[in-house]
């Protein structure tokens, strides 16, 4: 019977609609390293490769590699910069792995089946908020490289929806007594 209970169904519907819109917006696939793929043996500069693209939330990186020689480790920034491979955030070994970029910020990958970092394929990918998500971020703020990679954009519920729901409840509260005045219950 409370107004917050009354508001939740339409807020939920709104969120569902937003999610549907989000899933409609197209995700892009990026094959890491282009035609070189993901390899430590060709001295590919993956920083230059990544500089050529604008990665957005929802995009997918595809790592294609020889899984007898390479793998894919996703590391925290701290572990990436100190070459600590003991506790990767995630590890892939299939040779053809798709990694969806789920949030804005930096993602750090290295190939290292042998636990070494010297001369290994490595890349730091910067991911921007999705341009099509709702237009609340026309200029994506780049995350400073020095900070931890936690630039998670808060999904903002459109204020307009909440306001109109509130307005209708305010309307009821104001109009009900008026109606009772005009049409008193006998
Ligand atoms: C890779 O390319 C980036 C910029 O494209 C450059 O700053 C960097 O020095 C290069 N790294 C190597 C090892 O050549
Ligand atoms: C590597 O990271 C782990 C935690 O993930 C930590 O326990 C360990 O001490 C680190 N090793 C070095 C050499 O810093
Ligand atoms: C990798 O897998 C995708 C499907 O997930 C497929 O379309 C693609 O052709 C594969 N690439 C290679 C080189 O096997």
Image (cartoon, grey):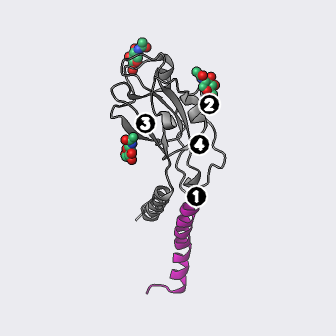
Secondary structure, mark 1, is: helix
Residue drawn at 54 percent across, 85 percent down: 182
| Up/down of 178 relative to 52, above or below | below
Q: For this view, does 94 lie left or right of residue 62? A: left
From mark 2 to mark 4, how far is it between C-alphas? 16 Å
From mark 2 to mark 3, how far is it between C-alphas? 26 Å
Which numbered disc, 4 or 1, marks the residue that appears first in the sequence?
Answer: 4
Residue drawn at 40 percent across, 65 percent down: 1
Q: For this view, does 100 lie left or right of residue 43? A: left
How busy is the neighbourhood of tag 4: few (under 14 within 10 Å), some, or many (20 plus)? few
Residue drawn at 60 percent across, 38 percent down: 52
Which numbered disc, 3 or 1, marks the residue that appears first in the sequence?
Answer: 3
**Residue mark closest to the camera, 4 vs 1:** 4
Does the magenta segment cover residue 184?
A: yes
| Up/down of 35 relative to 171, above or below | above
To which residue does mark 2 refer? Answer: 144
Residue 10 placement (x, y as % from top left) = 46, 65
Q: State the quadrant of the C terminus.
A: bottom left
Circles 3 and 4 in contact, beta carbons < 8 Å: no
**Residue extending furthest toward the right:** 139
Residue span colored magenta:
159-186
Which numbered disc, 2 or 1, marks the residue that appears first in the sequence?
Answer: 2
Circles 2 and 4 in contact, beta carbons < 8 Å: no
| Up/down of 159 relative to 31, above or below | below
The numbered dot on residue 54 is 4
The numbered dot on residue 159 is 1
**Residue mark closest to the camera, 2 vs 1:** 2
From mark 4 to mark 1, how far is it between C-alphas? 29 Å
Secondary structure, mark 3, is: strand
Residue 158 placement (x, y as % from top left) = 56, 58
Residue drawn at 52 percent across, 49 percent down: 155
């Amino acid at each position: 019977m409370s107004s917050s209970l009354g508001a939740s169904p339409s807020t939920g519907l709104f969120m569902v609609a937003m999610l549907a819109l989000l899933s409609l917006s197209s995700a892009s696939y990026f094959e890491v390293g282009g035609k070189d793929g993901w390899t430590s043996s060709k001295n590919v500069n993956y920083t230059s490769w990544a500089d050529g693209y604008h990665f957005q939330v929802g995009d997918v990186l595809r790592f294609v590699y020889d899984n007898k020689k390479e793998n894919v480790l996703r590391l925290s920034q701290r572990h990436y910069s100190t070459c600590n491979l003991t506790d990767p955030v995630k590890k892939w070994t299939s040779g053809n792995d798709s990694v969806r970029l789920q949030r804005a910020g930096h993602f750090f990958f290295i190939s290292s089946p042998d636990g070494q970092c010297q001369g290994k394929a490595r890349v730091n990918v910067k991911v921007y908020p999705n341009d099509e998500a709702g237009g609340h971020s026309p200029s994506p703020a780049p995350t400073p490289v020095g900070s931890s990679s936690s630039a998670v954009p808060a999904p903002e519920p459109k204020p307009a929806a909440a306001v109109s729901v509130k307005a209708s409840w305010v309307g009821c509260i104001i109009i009900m007594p008026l109606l009772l005045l005009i049409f008193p219950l006998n």
